[in-house]
Image: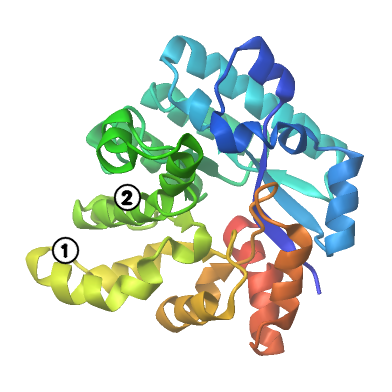
């Protein structure tokens, strides 16, 4: 069985050091693994039975810089990704990193990465300066993705200072850092981010736009019936219900979730064609993720779709 993992992170150590980038407590502990895109990573993939990784820079820290730094650093990240893919074209593909503080330049960079470098889409990390993807100023980026026929992978990012202070202050630093991100906060905010895009009419304007979320859908599958019954009646004038819109424009990956119950929930609400395999390397365990994929109680046909067929169809791999 071919296995394609599509949320697999990297970041060059040299750029972190030369640009004095603060990656935060969690990512800083993984810098050696983020930096490694050569034989050690390929060996880990082989041991876990992963044929292809779709690489993405853990680029929230660059995405939020001012345009004078974000534009050239995003371009450098993408050039490094492109070289890595060129060195191992059978094993790696890539999502672009975008300078979100300059939306027009970000749209141009997405176009360059897709049309010239062969990238499969882009990864955007949460808010930028407190702005969600439903804001009109970032519409050129989303319009470019729809025009190019590539998805946006919406990945969580650390919360803005006002949210961090309100919800996560007064705790030990390690606890606050985890609770505000992978321990809870990421998933709540990323799910809300997607819902903001739906209720604000982004998909009415851009009906072919495709969004991917990790972590088994960031809580949306579990809450979908409640979302529809409570939020649906107050969102009027749209061509589709909230639930139908989500099931039409949203794709889900297993990144970081290796449990049967969340997978069953995702499959029952979104269907087998909308769920794709991911590990979340280096924060997820590749061997554990593939063991879960091979052992979870789904049919062989469903397993093949999650493992590679859905990724091939969505990303054109």
Q: Residue at 43% across / 15% down in the picture?
A: 67
On screen, residue 70 above or below 45 = above
On screen, residue 93 above or below 58 = below
Helix, strand or loop at mark 1: loop
Picture coordinates of residue 199 (x, y %)? Answer: 20, 57
Along the horizontal axis of the image, is 82 left or right of 277? right
On screen, residue 301 above or below 95 = below
Q: Please name which of the two marks, 2 or 1, marks the residue nearer to the observer.
A: 2
Q: Residue at 72% across / 27% down in the picture?
A: 80
Please give the count of numbered marks on the rendered protein: 2
Q: Nearer the viewer, residue 39 or 250?
A: 39
Q: Residue at 32% across / 29% down in the picture?
A: 161
- Residue receiving disc 1: 238
Separation of disc 2 and disc 1 at Cα?
18 Å
Picture coordinates of residue 89 (x, y %)? Answer: 83, 45
Q: Residue at 73% across / 82% down in the picture?
A: 295
Helix, strand or loop at mark 2: helix
Can residue 317 be seen here? Answer: no
Q: Nearer the viewer, residue 144 or 80?
A: 80
Q: Are marks 2 and 1 in contact (CB under 8 Å)?
A: no
On screen, residue 68 above or below 41 = above
For residue 193, the mark is 2
Q: Residues within 10 Å of mark 2 (few under 14, many from 20)?
A: some
């Amino acid at each position: 069985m071919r296995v394609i993992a599509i949320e697999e992170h990297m970041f060059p150590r040299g750029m972190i050091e030369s640009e004095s980038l603060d990656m935060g407590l969690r990512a800083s502990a993984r810098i050696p693994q983020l930096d490694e895109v050569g034989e050690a990573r390929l060996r880990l993939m082989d041991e876990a039975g992963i044929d292809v990784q779709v690489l993405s820079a853990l680029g929230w820290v660059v995405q939020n810089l001012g345009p004078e730094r974000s534009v050239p650093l995003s371009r450098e990240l993408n050039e490094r990704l492109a070289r890595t893919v060129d060195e191992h074209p059978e094993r790696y593909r890539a999502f672009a990193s975008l300078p979100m503080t300059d939306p027009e330049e970000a749209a141009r960079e997405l176009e360059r990465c897709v049309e010239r470098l062969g990238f499969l889409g882009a990864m955007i990390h949460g808010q930028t300066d407190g702005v969600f993807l439903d804001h009109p100023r970032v519409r050129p980026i989303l319009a470019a993705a729809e025009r190019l026929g590539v998805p946006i992978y919406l990945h969580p990012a650390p919360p803005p200072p006002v949210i961090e202070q309100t919800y996560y202050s007064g705790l030990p630093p390690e606890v606050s850092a985890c609770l505000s991100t992978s321990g809870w906060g990421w998933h709540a905010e990323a799910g809300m981010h997607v819902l903001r895009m739906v209720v604000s009419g982004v998909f009415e304007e851009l009906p072919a736009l495709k969004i991917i979320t990790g972590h088994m859908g960031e809580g949306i599958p579990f809450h979908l019936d409640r979302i529809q019954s409570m939020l649906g009646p107050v969102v009027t004038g749209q061509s589709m219900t909230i639930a139908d819109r989500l099931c039409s424009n949203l794709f889900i990956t297993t990144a970081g979730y290796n449990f049967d119950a969340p997978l069953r929930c995702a499959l029952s609400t979104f269907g087998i064609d909308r769920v794709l395999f991911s590990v979340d390397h280096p924060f997820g365990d590749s061997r554990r993720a593939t063991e879960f994929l091979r052992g979870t109680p789904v049919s062989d046909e469903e397993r093949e779709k999650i493992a590679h067929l859905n990724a091939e169809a969505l990303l054109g791999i």
